């Protein structure tokens, strides 16, 4: 620990007793408890980049603030950070290894957000879902439903679009639901396929074991089975209680988290050949071999703009209107089930608005290219400083 290195953590300013403090939170969810520190301490922590010794940190802090902090105090801070598992250290690595091994051994992915984003009590959750969706009329479309695109923002902010989208599932009787969701953490590969059952407070949703067998026997897809990214990711989990409430028959799931397409947006890789085409072709093949009817659902938000996401421009009415106009262009490609057009629209603006649903929607469009699509809902949430947009759509043929 002579050269302490802080893990990737989020820092949010908060006001407590009239004092501005910084809340440090583990973005990976390895540690659920947050740490509250002063701005000065947060700055000192930012100096812990793995290249500086404690003496270097002392010097850099003094040069920036004019304040001398004794080495012993810096060591105390390092010890506190380490005890909270916020540093890359032997302590953290041991904890992480044990946690990951336990998760890998479990046949069930536990409900990470139960008691946080929604009730962990079965009856309370069902009552909430009934209030949210119970009085909504069945969604009807002129054709056989093949897919759904839904938000993955929390229920409170996305409720209007969730309510317009999920009623289309009520009378869909397909034994398999393939769910794509954005992974908000860095992943080693563009897809992370899970072979676990999924627990919610309502009941356990079973994964498609026969489909898992086909995936594990596929020379390409077997290399994309990766359980760990699913542990605390919300984009798929928030769909599960809604699916359970709306679907009136037995079903199984295939859960796939999607990583970044940054290299494609940057032009370093082409979407027209290579890994993506290979993945799509092999996914289509195993679904054909599986032989059961299925729908493809994606949990995918659109633009993320404003101060929370690093933008320094004002989030005024004109800015929101421009972002909405760009979203409408994207949704035109979704309506046409045009994966390439959808991607190119995002690439043209350099993904400046951080379309976190880029990859799941792109794969969904590739797999449903013979379908049609109707957009049934759209919204922009904003608190005046930041904004997230999202849409609901129904695919059919």
Image: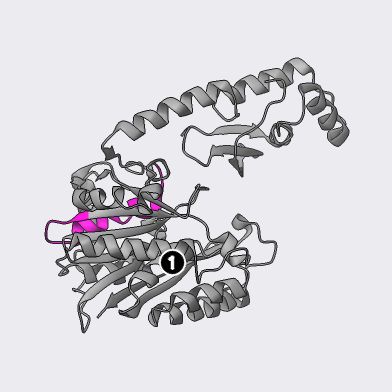
Is residue 288 part of the magenta span, yes or no? no
Quadrant (top left, top right, bottom left, bottom right) of the N terminus:
top right
Q: Which residues are magenta?
A: 232-252
- Where in the figure is residue 373, as x and y percent of width and height? 33, 79
- Residue at label 1? 277
* Residue 243 highlighted magenta (yes or no): yes
Comparing 34 with 1, the one in front is 1
Instruction: Name the foreground residue: 216 vs 145.
Output: 216
Q: Determine the residue positioned at 33% across, 73% down.
A: 368
Residue 309 place in picture, x, y as percent: 60, 57
- Drawn side of residue 110 relative to residue 52, left or right: left
Residue 50 in the image: x percent, y percent?
A: 71, 31
Say which quadrant the C terminus sits in.
bottom left
Q: Residue furthest front?
A: 219
Tell whether 135 sits left or right of 338: left
Task: Name the residue located 35 percent from the left edge and 29 percent from the top edge.
Answer: 102
């Amino acid at each position: 620990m002579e050269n302490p290195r802080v893990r990737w953590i989020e820092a949010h300013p908060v006001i407590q007793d009239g004092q501005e403090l910084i809340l440090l939170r583990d973005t990976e969810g390895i540690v659920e408890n947050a740490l509250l520190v002063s701005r000065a301490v947060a700055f000192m922590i930012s100096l812990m980049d793995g290249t500086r010794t404690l003496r270097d940190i002392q010097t850099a802090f003094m040069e920036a603030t004019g304040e001398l902090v004794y080495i012993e105090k810096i060591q105390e801070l390092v010890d506190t950070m380490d005890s909270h598992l916020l540093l890359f250290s032997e302590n953290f690595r041991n904890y992480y290894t044990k946690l990951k091994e336990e998760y890998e051994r479990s046949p069930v992915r536990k409900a990470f957000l139960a008691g946080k984003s929604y009730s962990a009590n079965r009856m309370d959750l069902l009552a909430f879902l009934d209030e949210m969706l119970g009085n909504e009329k069945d969604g009807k479309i002129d054709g056989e439903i093949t897919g759904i695109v839904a938000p993955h923002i929390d229920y409170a902010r996305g409720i209007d679009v969730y309510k317009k989208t999920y009623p289309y599932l009520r009378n869909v009787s397909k034994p398999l639901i393939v769910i794509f969701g954005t992974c908000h953490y860095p992943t080693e590969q563009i897809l992370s396929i899970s072979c676990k059952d999924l627990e919610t407070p309502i009941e356990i949703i079973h994964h498609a074991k026969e489909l898992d067998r086909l995936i594990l026997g596929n020379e390409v897809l077997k290399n994309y089975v990766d359980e760990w990214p699913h542990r605390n990711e919300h984009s798929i989990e928030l769909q599960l209680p809604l699916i359970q409430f709306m679907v009136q028959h037995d079903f199984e799931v295939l859960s796939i988290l999607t990583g970044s397409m940054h290299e494609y947006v940057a032009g370093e890789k082409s979407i027209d050949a290579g890994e993506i085409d290979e993945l799509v072709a092999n996914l289509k093949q195993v679904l054909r071999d599986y032989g059961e009817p299925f729908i493809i659902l994606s949990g995918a938000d659109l633009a993320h703009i404003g101060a929370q996401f690093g933008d320094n421009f004002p989030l005024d009415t004109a800015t929101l209107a421009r972002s909405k106009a760009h979203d409408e262009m994207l949704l035109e490609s979704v309506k046409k089930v045009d994966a390439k057009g959808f991607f190119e629209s995002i690439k043209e603006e350099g993904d400046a608005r951080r379309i976190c649903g880029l990859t799941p929607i792109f794969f969904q469009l590739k797999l449903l290219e013979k379908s049609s699509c109707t957009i049934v809902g759209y919204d922009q949430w904003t608190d005046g400083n930041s904004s997230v947009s999202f849409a609901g759509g129904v695919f059919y043929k």
